[in-house]
Each structure stands twice: as structure tokens, then as C-alpha cells.
Image (spheres, rainbow, N blue to C red):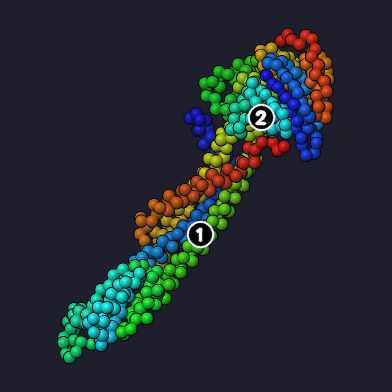
């Protein structure tokens, strides 16, 4: 699904660079991406999204060499990847439903398609009953679920979660993890960058650790499949 | 692009222009001032050109009066020489008898007075039709080198020169001024759109992250810029045509009503100006908004 081949990214100020990274992530896998700030996690994510190009090396996504993608094709590449941020990035003047529908509208989906898909996704994250609420009327965990719904609404192959529990309390974080696991079990590959040790220790998924731009450990643990909620 | 999303983009453009009313007014104002000045300059240039064109038939003629002592062969030879000049389109010989006959015809009732003349005092002459008004100077120079000419009569060379210089000067000046004003308008519209872009930064961020194409993201802003450009163009067109419709009155008040008869009628000119203003308005608006969104649509810097 994802393959980094000897990827290096050099910045002028050296922070967050990557050095000769080799990594393979299989379809349907769940990996934790851990490491200090500036270790290169964000660089990896930005490279996957093709927000930037590596200084050297190749990156494959879903069988395609994405370093070769032309600028025109970048938006279509991004449609295959859903992304969830630490600060949710919801639009405050739109309801839950509208926030999720927005993700479809802007890629040119038809109205009927939107009317069919949005409720399905909202029920997946258990927010059907709050679809007319505005973000400020929701708890942090609920807001993050809205952003998950928006990330999933175009059926991406990969879901990237960038510190998704960073703004949430431990109980809510664990609850949110159950949703990610559920989504992963339905076949979506998940890459989650996190600082949250409790979460990493609790779920026995593969852990990829970066330090100063190098892959220092890649631990596969047994019992990776978890039961969904 | 699907129809529904096309409508969406247009609607968003209108909403955004309305949201930033003050800046929109400033943009519309600058576009209309720029186009108004363009229009005034254009009208002046076109009208002066028309005056030049209209009086050209007189101006590009030179009449030379020949000495009476010139023999027939000399006159014919001179005609051949002049006809060979590159500036000369055609040549007409008017004998002293023709001239007198014409004078009699012109004098009408008083022609009897001419009957009392023993001899014909009028000279033979050539009327030289020039290729173009621009050649009159060099033609005059050549003619002054010929012998046997009593007098050269041309129509005020100075005035021709002044008219030509005036239109050319005005043209250069207005092209410069208009380019500067267009740049200013693009800049102001660009700033207005930047405000709109700034206000929708979050939306743009999300659009980009879910994979909206740049064209899609740009759409509403370009629509907004074009709306501002068109409104500005419409406004200046309104003012301009209103002014031109009343120009005769204004000129009369200024005491130069004789100019009025030279003016190009409004119907003959306004259609072109509509097209020109519309194109420029749309162009300025689109250019301004494209430059405003450019930064937001770029990728992360390495």
C-alpha cells in the first residue's frame, strides 16, 4: 500500500529531515508513527500527501510512484487519502452534516450521492443524532469524530491521523481509538502519528519509531487485529 | 464540472463580494476611474482622428500657381516631373481659362465685373493630390526646388503638424496612463480578493486536504473578481455615455460649439466601447483574483 524506498528529505535548517527511510505498510494495516517533535513524522505525512517532494528516493502509494505525479494530479491523489488533524479543522459556521457534506461537495460530488453517503458515514461514527448541531455544541471527542467522518466520506484507501487524540482526555481518546479500529477492520489502512504512550501501549499494533529523521525501530506485535466495538 | 457546482461557485462569488462591501466598493471605484479615464482619452483620440480624417481631403492637396511666361512644353514637362514624385497620388492641370470660368461661376451675379477685364489675370496651376497627409512636408520640399512656380498654396502645414502631433502625443500619454491605471486596478482588486481568501482560509485548507482541484478552489474568487470588474466597467460606461450624450451642450456652454459638428455620433462609437470595457473589466477582475489566490494554492515550501 505504502512503500518508502531510501527516501531522504533535507531541509535548510535540518529540523524534521528524513534520512534514507525504508518502510512498507500493507493494505489494511494499522501503524503508529511515534517519535519526538522534529523527528520527521510530519515530513513523512507531507511526503505521502505530496505536499512536498523528497530530496532523493521513491515513494509508492497504491502501486503508483507518487514522486512522479504531475501537479494536476495531486488533488486526485489526495482523494485517496483521508486526514484527521489534532485540532479537528471543522468549519464552525456549518453543521455536522454540512461539514461532512463539504468534503464531498468540493470534489464535485452530485447532490444525490452526497445525500446517500453522508448519513451512512455519520452513523459509522455514531453521530446521526447530532447531524444538525454546530461544532461548538459538541464535545471534543464528537468533533474529532466529525472530522473522521469528513476524512472518510470520499472512501479513501488510507486514513492518516496526525495526533488525533492530542486535544482529548484519556477516556475520550480510548473511545476514539475504537472508531479507528472499527474503520481499519473495514479495510482502510491507518497511519496514526501520536505522542500518546498509553494509547500505543494499549493497542498492540505495529509501531514505527523515528528519531532525528531515521527509522530507529519498527516493531510488529502479535494480535494486531482487535475486535471492533 | 457539474452544473450544480458551477452554480455553487457563482453564488459563493456573489456572497463574498457582498461580505466585503467596503473593499468591493473601492475595487469597483478604481476599475471605473481607470476605465473612465481610458474612455475619455479614447473619445478624444477618436474624435481628433475623425476631424483629421474629415479635413484630410483639403489638407492633402497642394495647389501650385505657375509663372505666366512658361511655355506649353515646360508646363507639360513639369507635370510629368511632379507626377513621378512618390508622394503624389494624382495631378490636375487647371488652365487660366478654366480658372476664370470657375471664378465667374462662383461670382454669379457679379460675374459681369470680370467681363471688363482685358486680359486674364489668373495663372495656370496644378492641383496635386498627395498620397497621404503625412507626406505633405516632403512634397513641399521637393516642389520648392522646382523653377517656374509663382506661388505654392497648401493648407496650413502647421495645423496639420499640430493635429498629428496632438493625436500621437495623446495616444502615447493615454496608453501609459491607462496601463498604470489598469495595474492599480488589478492590485486593488487583488487586495480585495485577498481579504476574501483570508476569511476563507480554513475552508481552503480543507478543500485542499480533501482533494479539491485548484480550479475548483479558485472558482468563487475569480467569479468575485470578475463581478467587481464588470460592475466597475458598467459604472464607467454609464458615466461616459451620459457625458458624451450631453457633450454638445457642454461644448456650447464652453463657447466652442463649432466643434460639435465634427463629433462622432454616439451610436457609432459606444458599441466598441462596451466591448472594450467589458473585456477589460473581466480581464482586470480575473487577473486580480488569480494573483490573490496564487499563494494559497501553492504546495508547502521545502
Chain letter of the residue carrying label 2: A
Q: Where does residue A60 sit, x and y in percent of width and height? A: 67, 24
The residue depicted at 66 percent of the width and 14 percent of the height is: A187
Which residue has dot 2 on it?
A: A67
- Residue A199 seen by the camera: no
Q: Nearer the viewer, residue B194 or A201?
A: A201
- Residue A69 seen by the camera: yes
Q: Where does residue A166 sit, x and y in percent of width and height? A: 78, 25
The residue depicted at 63 percent of the width and 34 percent of the height is: B204
Q: Residues within 10 Å of mark 2 (few under 14, many from 20)?
A: some
Pointer 1 with pointer 2, Cβ within 8 A: no
Task: Choose top left, top right, bottom left or bottom right for residue A32.
Answer: top right
Task: Choose top left, top right, bottom left or bottom right for residue B109.
Answer: bottom left
Chain letter of the residue carrying label 1: B
Q: Nearer the viewer, residue A36 or A168?
A: A36
Q: Is residue B268 above or below residue A69?
A: below
**Mark-to-mark CA distance, 1 and 2:** 47 Å
The residue depicted at 57 percent of the width and 43 percent of the height is: B289
Which label was assigned to residue B245? Answer: none
Which residue has dot 1 on it?
A: B175
Q: Nearer the viewer, residue B55 or A108?
A: B55
Tag 2 secondary structure: helix
The residue depicted at 50 percent of the width and 30 percent of the height is: B1
Q: Where does residue B161 sit, x and y in percent of width and height? A: 43, 72
Q: From the viewer's perspective, is B86 left or right of B280?
A: left
Q: Is residue B216 above or below residue B34?
A: above
Amino acid at each position: 500500500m505504502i512503500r518508502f524506498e531510501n527516501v531522504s528529505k533535507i531541509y535548510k535548517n535540518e529540523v524534521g529531515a528524513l534520512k534514507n527511510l525504508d518502510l512498507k505498510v500493507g493494505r489494511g494495516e494499522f501503524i503508529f508513527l511515534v517519535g519526538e517533535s522534529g523527528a520527521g513524522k510530519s515530513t513523512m505525512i507531507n511526503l505521502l500527501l505530496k505536499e512536498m517532494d523528497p530530496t532523493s528516493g521513491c515513494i509508492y502509494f497504491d502501486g503508483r510512484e507518487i514522486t512522479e505525479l504531475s501537479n494536476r494530479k495531486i488533488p486526485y491523489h489526495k482523494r485517496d487519502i483521508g486526514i484527521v488533524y489534532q485540532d479537528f479543522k471543522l468549519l464552525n459556521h456549518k453543521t455536522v452534516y454540512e461539514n461532512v457534506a463539504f468534503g464531498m461537495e468540493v470534489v464535485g460530488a452530485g447532490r444525490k450521492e452526497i445525500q446517500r453517503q453522508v448519513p451512512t458515514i455519520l452513523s459509522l461514527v455514531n453521530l446521526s443524532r447530532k447531524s444538525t448541531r454546530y461544532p461548538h455544541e459538541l464535545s471534543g471527542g464528537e468533533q474529532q469524530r466529525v472530522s473522521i467522518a469528513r476524512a472518510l466520506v470520499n472512501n479513501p484507501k488510507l486514513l492518516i491521523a496526525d495526533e488525533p487524540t492530542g486535544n482529548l482526555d484519556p477516556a475520550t481518546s480510548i473511545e476514539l481509538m475504537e472508531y479507528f479500529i472499527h474503520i481499519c477492520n473495514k479495510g482502510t489502512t491507518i497511519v496514526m502519528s501520536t505522542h500518546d504512550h498509553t494509547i500505543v501501549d494499549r493497542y498492540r499494533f505495529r509501531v514505527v519509531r523515528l528519531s532525528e529523521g531515521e527509522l530507529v525501530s519498527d516493531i510488529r506485535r502479535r494480535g494486531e487485529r482487535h475486535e471492533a466495538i | 464540472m457539474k452544473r450544480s457546482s458551477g452554480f455553487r461557485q457563482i453564488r459563493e462569488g456573489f456572497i463574498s463580494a457582498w461580505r466585503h462591501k467596503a473593499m468591493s466598493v473601492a475595487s469597483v471605484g478604481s476599475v471605473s476611474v481607470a476605465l473612465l479615464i481610458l474612455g475619455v482619452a479614447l473619445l478624444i483620440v477618436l474624435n481628433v482622428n475623425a476631424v483629421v480624417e474629415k479635413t484630410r481631403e483639403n489638407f492633402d492637396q497642394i495647389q501650385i500657381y505657375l509663372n505666366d511666361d512658361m511655355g506649353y512644353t515646360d508646363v507639360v514637362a513639369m507635370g510629368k516631373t511632379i507626377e513621378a514624385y512618390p508622394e503624389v497620388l494624382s495631378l490636375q492641370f487647371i488652365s487660366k481659362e478654366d480658372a476664370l470660368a470657375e471664378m465667374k461661376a462662383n461670382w454669379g451675379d457679379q460675374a459681369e465685373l470680370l467681363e471688363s477685364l482685358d486680359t486674364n489675370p489668373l495663372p495656370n496651376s496644378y492641383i496635386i493630390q498627395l498620397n497621404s497627409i503625412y507626406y505633405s512636408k516632403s512634397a513641399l520640399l521637393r516642389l520648392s526646388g522646382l523653377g517656374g512656380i509663382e506661388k505654392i498654396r497648401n493648407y496650413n502645414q502647421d495645423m496639420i503638424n499640430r493635429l498629428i502631433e496632438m493625436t500621437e502625443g495623446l495616444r502615447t500619454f493615454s496608453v501609459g496612463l491607462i496601463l498604470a491605471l489598469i495595474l492599480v486596478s488589478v492590485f486593488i482588486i487583488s487586495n480585495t480578493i485577498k481579504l476574501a481568501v483570508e476569511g476563507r482560509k480554513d475552508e481552503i485548507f480543507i478543500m485542499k486536504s480533501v482533494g479539491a482541484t485548484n480550479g475548483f478552489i479558485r472558482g468563487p474568487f475569480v467569479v468575485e473578481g470578475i463581478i467587481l470588474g464588470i460592475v466597475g466597467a458598467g459604472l464607467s460606461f454609464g458615466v461616459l455615455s451620459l457625458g458624451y450624450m450631453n457633450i454638445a451642450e457642454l461644448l456650447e456652454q464652453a463657447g466652442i460649439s463649432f466643434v460639435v459638428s465634427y463629433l462622432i455620433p454616439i451610436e457609432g462609437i459606444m458599441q466598441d466601447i462596451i466591448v472594450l470595457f467589458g473585456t477589460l473589466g473581466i480581464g482586470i477582475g480575473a487577473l486580480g483574483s488569480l494573483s490573490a489566490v496564487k499563494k494559497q494554492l501553492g504546495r508547502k515550501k521545502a
